[in-house]
Amino acid sequence: MASNFLLCFCALLGVTVSQTTAQSFGFPSTSDALQGSNHLTSDDGPPSLPRPLDAPPLLADDDPPPAPATDAPRPTRDRNVMRFVREPQSQLVKNGGRAELACAVNTAGVTIEWLYGGKSVVTNSRNRLRQSDGTLVISKVKRRGRGEGMYQCKVLSDAGAMLSRPAQITIAGAEREFSVSPANVSVAAGGTALLRCSLVSLPPARIIWMRAGQPLPVNDSQRLAADLPGQLVIRGVTAADAGQYSANGSLVLPCVADGKPPPAVRWTRADGRLIRLRCLADGQPPPTVTWLKDGQRITVEGGRVRAKDGQLVITNVQTKDAGIYQCVAYNRAGYTATGVRIEMAVGTSEQVHAPTNVRVTGITSRSAFVSWSVDDRSQYVGFSLHYRAPTDEMDSQEVSNNLSLQLKYLQPFTNYSVYIRGYSGNMASDPSPTVTFVTSEDVPSQTPRVTLVTVSPTALNVSWEPLPPKVSNGVVTGYRIISQRYQDGNTASMVEVPGDRRSFLMTGLEPGGRYEVRVLAATRVGYQNVTGEGVNDAKWVVQRMPLVSSVSHGPQTPTVHLVVSNHSTIRIWWEMPSGPHSPPPAAFVVQYRRLEKNAHLSNEVRLPGNASEHYLTGLAPKTWYEVHVKTVSADERTAESIKTISTLPVEPHRQSGYNISVMLEPPVGLHVKARNATAVLVRWEQPPSARIIKYFTVMWHPLGRDAVPPSQLSSTSREVTVIGLEPYTYYEFSVRSHDAEGTDGPFSEGVRVRTLEGVPTPPANVTWSPLDASRILVRWRPPRSPHGQVSGYRVLYTADRDSPLDRWTALDIPASSGTQMQIAKLVPNQQYWVRVRARTATALGDLSDPAEFQIRAVLDRSAEGKADETPASTNVGQCP
């Protein structure tokens, strides 16, 4: 069994304001080896910065290099810095028993508060705070929120606040009956008998094996052994061993012991232009890292404060950022924390006032005019304007020397927040009040994704997905469905439907005919213009109608059932009606949405045809949802069933804001393997947890595309195949566990894989030019989506467009030869067609549209009748 350990490093890597100072706070109960620093300042620039005692500075890739060791004094330990000298310890007590939790720091003038389940403890006759040493005394510990649970000590001082390690008070107990009892077994003489029993208890019960009311001398001989809890092995069975065996479970409360080798905690600083705290935690299993400020969990503040991968970054430093910051790292092996104090040493008299009267006018779909005011313009050397949309990870910033600025390149129909900061010769002001505004609507910048499904030889169902807000550019008020026979604009027809529609049934089509359809969306401004710029975003979707003789029975509608297990999870399971008229489904598709106006359906989750259930996780509490389950046949026809249900409200004991007592381990042994260009197989093992794991959630996202939100699906098995991925693309996968009590564990470490090469899209812009009366030069552009490494191209041409493709003349060239090729031995004035396709190592790509060409050759007859002279010449040109 792998040993458990925990090691945490925290680093302060930079401070934006040069007058900022830092101070470290240690936790001796966690680590006697904790190192801090003195209170360091500098009179002529940034404060002096300590270097780590045993290691080089911990810097990000974009950090400036550290100063030489001679430029910064080595830190010394300050034993006067506030730190915990006693922290509460977890305890196991009997029901109704007494518990005491101790908490003390090394400095006076502090206030000690206690938290229970993340909320303040109310002192009364049962919960008493001993004023002399800050100990919390609980006279009677009861179940169901009456003493049993997680406690933390919160220390408040003039500099801020700190939280202690969590301590869990648990009531010992055992089930009334054995969960597994010994069963009758028959064993041949000389064989081995195995008896099992199990009793659910806390702490684990001690199992005693008995026969005829007398304890068995297990482990005292080679024949009887109970090496594993709840398991009796009898080797070399004889007739004398026949009889009745029983097991007794006794519950013994152990002594709570500590004193394990503690982890070491250190912090370092290096020059930089922003506040960056880095906490590098190492352990087995990998620990979870959380950041606190003044005892409260830090929340992301509009992109200015970000916490990710154990690193806390604060940009545009403000006076309110002063306080005590704690990095908390924990896993099932233990808990450790370190603290850093950030304070502003500059007097308020040196800081210019924040700008006021911020106004936003002249708002269009992609620009806005921002202006502001200050009391004394001569005190300011410049201003910075910070703005962001809700989906932006960080603030965007513009600089102005005036009291106004025109913002450009904004997203249409988007909420923006904006604030201003002024700058003097020394430092920046605090931010102005934040002002919000909404840009105007615009026409959509993309068309919806369209799906065509044949209903009959003469009917075609057209469905489409709603546009994401980033490309809809406003509220979609309607859709325009345009259809025509394949590449025959003379047969085009159009119909418009309201904006709440997601499908349309086309009827009266010709069996066996080939049709193409596209859908345009409109806002109040109008429809997307597909005749000029952006026409490539409005691609046609092609469908050939079936012949009457090929019609088969369509898929049947599933019978859907919904079960709500907690406030954020819905279990979906379904049944298929039995009957001879429908083939088995090829797949199922699950989608859902909130049951409210303008709510969009989620992305499709495609499941195999033998699936019968699916979990929706991460839902909002006490909210109605609409669930769609589609049966998909082998020819992609669908039959849909829709059900609605409401999630449960959040239970009161789960509303705590900071709770790290629940440590549900992530799955282990994560393995991913690309199956093809669009599918990846994901496998994992159940975590070594005593909890009952109900199901798992798989999360994945393409690397290098931060704007694409992660996708998720849930599974009760330990293996899923994720489909619908992009070819030849790197993805990162991680998995987390969910237990039977509705607890969501952390995601495992990500594992990366690249999908296999796929089919390249057609080469673009196929053109030609004549070289002489029998040769032309064909040119093209590489595929827009190669889906792999293009290894070459195939050029096909023919004089008979309707001939099968295998009768076209094919010429191959490697990719190293470029994107052009000569075609020779052509007949002048003969009409030809040419097509080009790319190829990768695994597949030939799609064909480009046919390009028609003809070498027009005109014979010069001016030399006729003149014997023994040069032959008549030929004029060559392109066909008009």
Image (cartoon, rainbow, N blue to C red):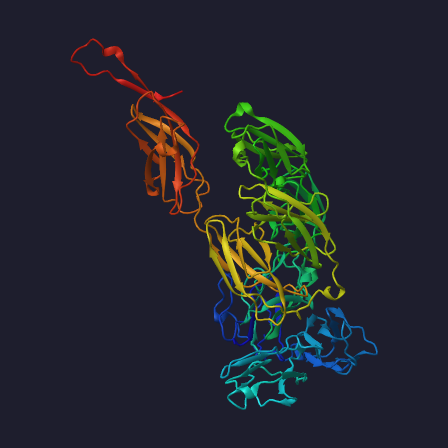
Q: Is residue 333 above or below residue 273?
A: below
Q: Is residue 798 above or below residue 311?
A: above
Residue 119, percent across and down? 75, 68
Identify which residue, 51 or 151, lies in the foreground. Answer: 151
Looking at the image, can residue 292 be seen? yes
Relative placement, left or right, of 858 versus 604 is left
Residue 643, percent across and down? 70, 48
Q: Is residue 64 above or below residue 247?
A: above
Relative placement, left or right, of 766 versus 372 is left
Residue at the left extreme?
868
Residue 233, percent across and down? 54, 82
Identify which residue, 848 or 859, lies in the foreground. Answer: 848
Count the numbered circles shown: 0
Looking at the image, can residue 410 be seen? no
Residue 3, percent across and down? 53, 77
Identify which residue, 436 or 779, lies in the foreground. Answer: 779
Q: Where, quadrant-wise, is the C terminus in this rendering?
A: top left
Identify which residue, 300 or 383, lies in the foreground. Answer: 300
Residue at the right extreme?
125
- Specify the quadrant of the image occupied by residue 145: bottom right
Instruction: Say which residue appears at 72% left-offset and 81% top-offset.
Output: 93
